[in-house]
Image (tube, rainbow, N blue to C red):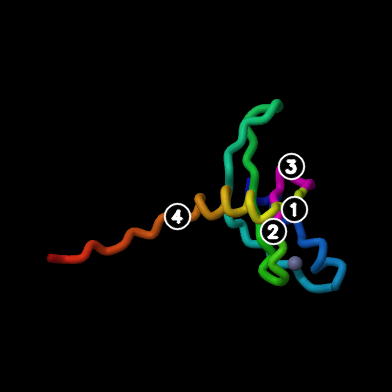
Amino acid sequence: MIDSLFTLYCEDCEIAGRPSRLWVRAEIEASTSRGPETHHYLECMNCGFRFKSCMEDHMEAVDEDEWRRCVDEALPVIPRPEPLG
Ligand SMILES: [Zn+2]
C-alpha cells in the first residue's frame, strides 16, 4: 500500500530540480462510490506544499481548512503525565 506513495512527488520541487521529500501526515478512510479508499495527506518537507493523494497517481492540493480538519485531528494524542498529588 505504502509503496504507491513513492511514485508521488512534489511538483514545485520537481520543477525547481529539488528532490522532494514527502511526509505522510495522515491516512483517512473515506467511503466513495467505488468503495472504501484511503486518502493520504502528504506534506513536502522542502517547500511545505500540502496535498492529498486519492488515487495512486493523482494528487490534489489541500486547503488550510481541510488540512486542519483531517490532519490535525488525526495526529496521535500524546498522553500527558498525570500530575501527582
Ligand atoms: Zn516541495
Q: Earlier in the sequence, mark 4 or mark 2?
A: 2
Given contact means CB atoms under 8 Å apart, are the residues at marks 1 and 2 in contact?
yes
Other residues around mark 3 within 10 Å, as few (<14) / some (14–19) / many (≥20): some
Q: Residue at x 58, y 56 (%)?
A: 25
Indicate the quadrant where residue 77 lies: bottom left
Residue carrying label 2: 50
Query: Which is in the foreground here, disc 3 or disc 1?
Result: 1
3 in magenta: no
Q: Amino acid at mark 1?
A: Ala
Q: Amino acid at mark 3?
A: Met
Quadrant of the picture in which ligand 1 is shown: bottom right
Q: Earlier in the sequence, mark 3 or mark 2?
A: 2
Residue 76: give its label: 4
Q: Quadrant of the C terminus?
A: bottom left
Label 4 – label 1 distance at C-alpha: 23 Å
Q: Amino acid at mark 2?
A: Arg
56 in magenta: yes
Q: Could you say where residue 32 lies in the image, as x and y percent from the top left?
A: 67, 30
Residue carrying label 3: 55
Q: Which residues are magenta?
A: 50-58
Other residues around mark 2 within 10 Å, as few (<14) / some (14–19) / many (≥20): many
Q: Could you say where residue 8 lies in the image, as x and y percent from the top left?
A: 75, 55
Q: Earlier in the sequence, mark 3 or mark 1?
A: 3
**Compared to 26, does 48 lie above or below?**
below
Residue carrying label 1: 61
